[in-house]
Image: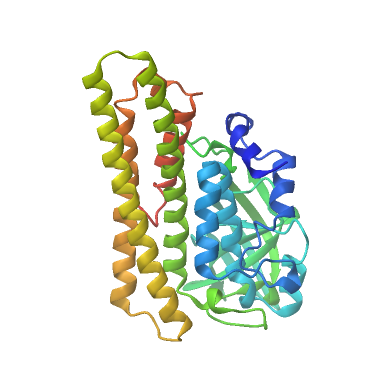
């Protein structure tokens, strides 16, 4: 099976509510969950721009597929924060992938040699096949809750998965809630971003995490928008053969050209800025607070433009656009859902 078949099976994937095993096998074979992992651990060891472009390409194939590749690869950034032994154990398996949440919705009670963790976390994409979960907790020490936050890596068999993902789009991302109750986490399975404990780190891992996340999620939106415009063009071509009102077709084609131009402008701006930031980072020049803030604003505005492009088009595509099983409707719902991520909303 190749990636084009993933596109052909997009409706099946949505209706199933998760990635079928044979499509997961493609991801494992092509190391799509390991784009930023060292080759010694079975990864592709891509640089930032290469990986972000993969996210967009996979999302242009199918939003669910691209979202899960992006989320799964995002876990690669935790590799340097773990001890070498734990990092190799978690990331070496062929099917290794992390799911989890950045919200500190748990409590970690300090005990000898580790923590006892309890809590629940929503929207953990890839929960149905993740081999490890990462979670954040507030630390409770000597009976007193503190403001300190600890990140933990938890084995799959220690986690309860609550199948509650019922969003309008990205239905196959299995973004379920997870729970743990009184699970002991040893000190060597806790970590903090920015603290390096092994030799597997590269320039991607030291890139500002928030900017990395914004770039990742925006690339998904760009890919889904690209897919939307491809499908819209096909529908317009069909309408051109069916309709005899030249002025109606002309207006629709002009609208499409306008939206396509807006998309290309957003895409070019994104990669121009990200390329400049990446080059600066490779030269070991730290991004300024203003640059990071500018990138955040650009990401949110660009995601809004992507949704606006699709909304402008969908109003003119007739009844095809409102049928839930129609390709254009599925892509539109996936885009609206992806753009709702906290990194991209106002």
Q: State the residue at coordinates (44%, 46%).
A: 338
Q: State the residue at coordinates (25%, 26%).
A: 250
For this rendering, which residue is in front, 245 or 22? 245
Q: Quadrant of residue 183?
A: bottom right
For this rendering, which residue is in front, 138 or 71? 71
Could one spot residue 124 in this view of the protein?
A: no
| Residue 278: x %, y % from top left | 44, 74
Q: Quadrant of residue 253?
A: top left
Vertical comparison of 223 with 277: above or below: above
| Residue 47: x %, y % from top left | 55, 71
| Residue 198: x %, y % from top left | 67, 82
Could one spot residue 117 in this view of the protein?
A: yes
Vertical comparison of 244 with 299: above or below: above
Q: How many marks?
A: 0
Q: State the residue at coordinates (60%, 74%).
A: 191
| Residue 204: x %, y % from top left | 54, 74
For this rendering, which residue is in front, 122 or 55? 55
Colour pattern of the rendering: rainbow
Q: Is residue 26 shown left or right of residue 178?
A: right
Q: State the residue at coordinates (29%, 54%).
A: 301
Q: Quadrant of residue 95?
A: bottom right
């Amino acid at each position: 099976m190749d990636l084009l078949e993933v596109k052909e099976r997009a409706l099946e994937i949505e209706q199933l509510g998760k990635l079928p095993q044979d499509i997961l096998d493609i991801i494992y074979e092509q190391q799509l969950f390991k784009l930023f992992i060292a080759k010694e651990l079975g990864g592709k060891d891509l640089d930032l721009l290469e990986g972000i472009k993969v996210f967009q390409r996979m999302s242009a194939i199918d939003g669910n597929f691209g979202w899960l590749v992006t989320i799964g690869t995002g876990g690669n950034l935790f590799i340097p924060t773990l001890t070498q032994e734990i990092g190799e154990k978690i990331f070496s398996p062929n099917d290794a992938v992390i799911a989890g949440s950045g919200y500190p919705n748990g409590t970690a009670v300090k005990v000898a040699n580790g923590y006892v963790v309890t809590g629940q976390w929503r929207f953990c994409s890839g929960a149905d096949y993740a081999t490890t979960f990462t979670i954040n907790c507030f630390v409770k020490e000597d009976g007193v809750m503190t403001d300190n936050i600890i990140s933990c890596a938890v084995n799959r068999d220690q986690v309860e998965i609550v199948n509650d993902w019922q969003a309008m789009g990205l239905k196959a991302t299995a973004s379920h809630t997870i729970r743990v109750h009184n699970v002991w986490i040893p000190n060597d399975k806790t970590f903090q971003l920015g603290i390096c404990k092994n030799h597997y780190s590269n320039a991607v891992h030291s890139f500002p995490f928030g900017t990395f996340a914004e770039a990742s999620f925006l690339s998904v939106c760009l890919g889904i928008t690209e897919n939307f415009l491809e499908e819209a063009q096909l529908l317009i071509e069909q309408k051109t053969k069916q309709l005899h009102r030249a002025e109606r077709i002309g207006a629709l084609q002009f609208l499409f050209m306008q939206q396509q131009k807006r998309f290309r402008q957003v895409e070019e701006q994104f990669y121009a800025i990200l390329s400049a930031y990446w080059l600066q980072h490779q030269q070991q020049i730290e991004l300024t607070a203003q640059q990071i803030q500018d990138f955040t604003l650009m990401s949110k505005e660009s995601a809004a433009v992507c949704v606006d492009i699709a909304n402008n088009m969908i109003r003119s595509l007739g009844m095809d656009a409102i049928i839930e099983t129609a390709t254009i409707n599925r892509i539109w719902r996936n885009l609206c859902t992806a753009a709702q991520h906290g990194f991209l909303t106002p």
